[in-house]
Amino acid sequence: SKDRTTLYYLSNQARPKSPDLSVWKYDTATRMGTRILAPEGLTAGTLKHSSNDDKLALTLSREGKANVGVFPLPEGPLVTLTDDGRSYGPAFSPDGTRVLFVKDVPGQMSELHVMDVQGKGPSASVPGLSGFAPAWSSVPGPSDEEAALEYEIRHKGRPDPRAPTAVPPAK
């Protein structure tokens, strides 16, 4: 957290013989961990914290199918943003209103998509880009629209594949 009093992490410590991971909150003052999300029948993964300390984004997996969810802090409820079984690796926009994630497309390279954190409307693909493990960092400018993406990228015909790319607004 911003004030460095809380750490969020994934663990199976409540069910050590299970491969399923739950989301835990660790209080640095008391040195106590508390399980805050144990999605029934799902494994949590790729946990990301929003810059304004009010939500977590995570990958939710079941039987090899992955989807993206957002967990509003401190108590939820969990909002599942995708249900296609092919979405993973979420990252928040600098203002915390959108989530960037990877979506596997059968027979093609994976795509980067962006979606509203409330799950309103479909996701929008980021044209011409393919990659994984996205991270969204802000750059000087008056709005979130002027944010840059940083991620591992596969070249898709762009002259400089490492140049910042504009992200379309969530629909």
Image (spheres, helix red, strand yellow):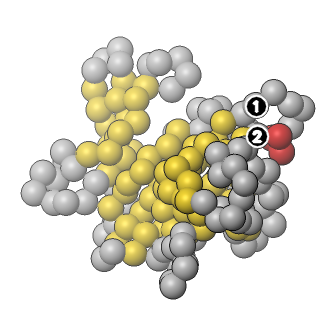
Q: Look at the numbered disc 1 and give the secondary structure of its residue.
A: loop
Q: Is residue 121 above or below residue 28?
A: below
In the rendering, at what x and y percent does residue 36 appear? Answer: 39, 45
Apparent side of residue 95 relative to residue 14 in the rendered image (left or right): right
Query: Is disc 1 surrounded by few (<14), some (14 to 19) or many (20+) residues within 10 Å?
Result: some
Decide which of 49, 127 is in the foreground and name it: 127
Cα distance between the residues tagged 1 and 2 = 5 Å
Q: Is residue 78 above or below residue 141?
A: below
Marks 1/2 in contact by CB < 8 Å: the verdict is yes
Check disc 1 and report the residue beneath it.
Answer: 139
Check disc 2 and report the residue beneath it.
Answer: 147
Quadrant of residue 44 in the image? bottom left
Residue at image coords 56%, 47%: 151
Residue at image coords 53%, 17%: 3
Q: Look at the numbered disc 2 and give the secondary structure of its residue.
A: loop
Apparent side of residue 136 relative to residue 159 in the rendered image (left or right): left
Looking at the image, which residue sits at the far bottom?
107
Quadrant of residue 54 in the image? top right
In the rendering, at what x and y percent does residue 133 appear? Answer: 49, 51
Indicate the amino acid at tag 1: Val
Quadrant of residue 21 in the image? bottom left
Indicate the amino acid at tag 2: Ala
Query: Is disc 2 surrounded by few (<14), some (14 to 19) or many (20+) residues within 10 Å?
Result: many
For residue 96, say whether it is visible. no
